[in-house]
Amino acid sequence: MHSFKTENEKRSTFDYFLSQPHQPFFLAGIFWAVFTMLVFMLGYKGVLPLTVDSTLFHAYTMIFIVISHFFHGFLLTTFPRFCMSAPIPRPVYVKLFAIYEAGSALFIAGAIFYPLLALVGMAITFIGHLLVVSNFIQIYKAGGSPDKSDPFWLLVAHAAGLLFHTLFIAGLAVTLSGGGAFWYEAAYGGFYLYLTFLTFAVAQRMIPFFSHVMAHKPKNFLPIVFASLLLKTLFFAIGFMVAEAVVSILLAIYLFREFIGWKLPVFSSPAILWVLHMGLFWLPAALLIDSVTTVAQLWMQTSFVFGGMHLIAVGFIITILIGFGTRVTLGHSGQVPHADRFSTALFWFTEVVVLVRFFYSVGMGLGIDIGWLFDLSAALWMLLFILWGTRFGPTLFRGKAGR
């Protein structure tokens, strides 16, 4: 009788873990955030020889494995609500989750042991990505929402993601066959037109809503941002760095002006909200700094090791991710979304990770020997997700205390 009860409890816990799409995807995202950074750090330093370029490994895992896990988990839960459609059935998102985990594991195993296996892993992950987008399209068509402009641009971001995902796979295939490495352009486009724009499209909708603010946005707000990021990507691809810097400055000014016009309660909101406000304003700030470092690279003939891009990646995307992830986890577990001291400390710790990674880029650009900051920034990244997983992993897996 005791064993029967224990078996039922185990089944109940596992059923809860798979009861909503964000739970398995968030937990897997936490794991991959730590594990892939560890592999990249060891590979970059030559401790663990990789079968693929370490920078390719880092770019691909961050864009299409780690952060995609979090945003797919979030959107598989909320996209049907955006479109006023029925929730995604459990068998569907469980199958998508299984495909993603298989592809991710095979890519990383291949990157360590056998490059063709990494290519197979990328192909499987791409199939998972394609099926996710296919489900979103079906929801978009079936949904009864009178205004589908935001869901439409989320689909545009995913269409860009699929394009650059394809280019990543082709780039690795060409590299393995002895050709040139054009995946750098794929990484740049995947970062800005997929990951950055996807984060922005979600943030510009949800942050004013969470803040109880009526944000009056221009009709072409999202198209302008997407077009600007497209120009930035194209100028990078053809090596027209001055034009890229100009686009970054103009977009930063545009976003600053719009965000200020929203009148967000930046200085009077609780931590669960101000972390999102901080993440939002990181985007124009990072774009402005990125333009400065781009011009400085040309003038000084040096490299700031994608410092501006990492400011956007950690300052904007990861800050938003941590903020949304914390709120969604608490909100969907039946708890009031409130950041306690530990959560608030994690929010501030995220900004420490931002600054340490940027100082590493500045030091490299100025020729200062501070390579130890690379190790520190990677270690802080892993610690951030370990702490976040320790705090919220049990909630994602089995629900609030006492469940």
Image: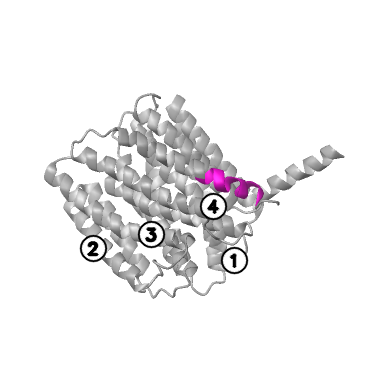
Using a 10 Å C-alpha cutoff, classify the residue at mark 2 as few (fewer than 14 neighbours), some (14 to 19) or many (20 or more): some
As drawn, is 36 to the left or to the right of 2?
left
**What is the tally of numbered marks visible in this picture?**
4
| Residue at (61% x, 46% y) in the render | 394
Residues at marks 4 and 3, CA–CA distance in whole angstroms: 23 Å
Residue at numbered disc 4: 73
Left or right: 243 as drawn, with respect to 344? left
Residue extending farthest front: 341
Mark 2 or mark 1: name the one nearer the start of the chain.
Answer: 1
Chain part drawn in magenta? 388-399
Given the image, on which type of amino acid does mark 1 rest? Answer: Ser
Classify residue 167 by image quadrant.
Answer: top left
Q: What residue sits right under mark 2 in the picture?
A: 250
Check the image and name the residue furthest to the right: 1
Label 2: which secondary element: helix
Against 45, residue 334 (above or below) is below
Q: Is residue 1 magenta?
A: no
Along the polypeptide, which appears first: circle 1 or circle 4? 4
Q: Provide the residue designation for mark 3.
A: 278
| Amino acid bearing label 4 | Gly
Q: Are marks 1 and 4 in contact (CB under 8 Å)?
A: no
Answer with mark 2 or mark 3, whichever residue precedes in sequence.
2
Q: Which of the two discs, 1 and 4, sits closer to the camera?
A: 4
**Side of 268 where 83 appears, left or right:** right
